[in-house]
Image (cartoon, helix red, strand yellow):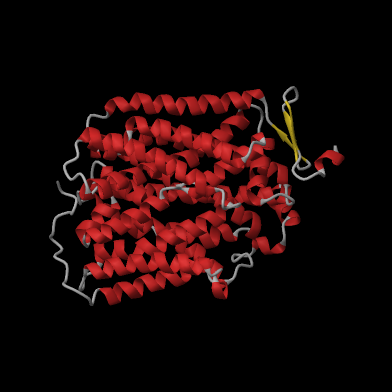
Amino acid sequence: PPAETACGRYFRLNFNSGRFIMQDVVVNWTNLDWLAIFMYLGGMILVGWYVSRKVRNSEDYLMAGRALSYPMVVATVAATWYGSGAVFGTAELAFGSGIAAFVVWCVPAHLGRIPLALWVAPRVRGVKENTIPALLGRLYARPVAILGAVLIVCYSSRLMDIVSVGIMGNTVTGLPNWVIGAVIVGVVICYSMFGGLWSVVMTDVLQFFLMTSLTLLLLPGVWTAVGGFEGLRTALPAGHFSPAGGMSVSQILVFFLLGFQVYADPAAYQRFGASNSAKTAKRAYLTCLLIWMAFDAVMTMLGLGARALYPELQGSKAFLTMAINAMPPFLTGLWICSILAVIMSTMSSFFLVGATTLTCDLIKPMFRPCMTDREQIRLTRIFMVCIGLSGCLLAFQFSAVLDAVVFLGGLYLASAFVPVLGGLFWKWRLTVAGGFLSMLGGMGVTLLWQSLGNPLGLKPMLVALPASFLLFLIGNMIGKPIDRNAESVNEC
């Protein structure tokens, strides 16, 4: 009733009819949909437990024995990279700015990754380091590796993914965001702990199938509901059909640059290293580019549909409400599972990356250089729990997924992009100071600019990334040039 829904955030559940009333919006949800959710979450835990039998040593646990085939690499890379930022971030941007979400963010990001597939992936597969900090340790020295490890642990908290599941769970159940976030993080940690990267990869394969098939299944119903192109043209502001969507030059530049954070992405490098050959890594990543481009086009259209159908709601809630009401019982639950699959596959990968980084790049070289396989696996499991809990505590400082994406993605891009790519491909004088100052400067400028409230209306990344490159150039003039044939600092 209007008298009830007018009072703040009114939420009521009627189990008999399977209908929610939330903020004047009727949301269809039945016990069959709950069944789909519980089946999915239980299935992920069972798969993680079953696959754990393949783990015989720390290389199996952390790198899947470096035996991932082409289909496995395609599924796990596609599912891992396509996380909450790509789903909710794209939908939110399309909701607010229209087709610019695809033109400004998606297309440049994927085209810019072609060099990563052609040259970086085979190069990474050719080295024996398992993590980016270990690679930084070989390229520079231990201080740069330690700083990189700290940065990657922060990035692996996946604040944007936890925000996403909180918004999703609140929209569906009405429970507080943090409760749903904690439950999903707990499930992710549970199945990831069993078999390490093998568990993550095999659950990614199932999640990849869910996310592609069910999201594509949603589009025809939404397209019919909005009345196709003509319906969108009538319902949406004219600016939503502009390639720039009314965004400023600095906003466009931020979204353009965010696509390049993958060049220093720790989960991507882990998958490259776990591939069974350099050729597999390259072919799989090129295949993923086509999958991502198609998926982004679908998500952009769904974001436009959400704006046309529910313009009064916030972007992510409008997107979820539209999807829940567009599908029949049980399929609605399965669709929510497909979005959970997108997010959980990314969380599991990064929780493992962060825990591996703490174990192999901080604890092992500094305190236990000859740690046994059993000790490495046990410590990695403990750190996965710690990272997941830390993410839950910090995530809900952000009310929108896109805000978390821009902040955390910008921090990582500004700090890691120049030292990682510079270390791999810079052909001139390279010193430890160059890598250290570049990374420290990117982190420091990002945090300082954010704390000052983004002076001049510029996002921190637009100032921090040039500063990181400048400090890289200056630092390479200081100290003794690096011996590029030196062994990794993490050797026992």
Farthest front residue in view: 367
Q: Where's residue 231, x and y in %?
A: 73, 51
Left or right of residue 480: residue 377: right
Of 263 and 279, nearer the camera is: 263
**Residue 101 horizontal/vertical position (percent):** 57, 58
Q: Is residue 402 visible?
A: yes
Residue at 34% x, 41% y: name it. Answer: 73
Horizontal and vertical percent for residue 460? Answer: 49, 67
Residue 194's place in the image compared with 162, above or below, is above
Q: Nearer the viewer, residue 388 or 472?
A: 388
Q: Looking at the picture, does residue 433 appear above or below residue 342?
A: below
Q: Quadrant of the N terminus?
A: top right
Q: Is residue 478 left or right of residue 4?
A: left
Task: Determine the residue positioned at 42% across, 35% down.
Answer: 189
Q: Residue at x 44, y 61 (%)?
A: 411
Front in this rendered view, residue 217 or 129: 129
Whether residue 265 appears in this view of the structure is no
Above or below residue 232? Residue 19 is above
Residue 426 in the image, given as x and y percentages of width and height: 25, 68
User: Total of numbered circles in the picture?
Assistant: 0
Relative to 230, is 80 on the left or the right?
left
Taking the image as shown, residue 143 lies to the left or right of residue 228, namely left
Q: Is residue 27 above or below residue 128?
A: above
Q: Say which residue appears at 38% left-offset and 28% top-offset.
A: 48
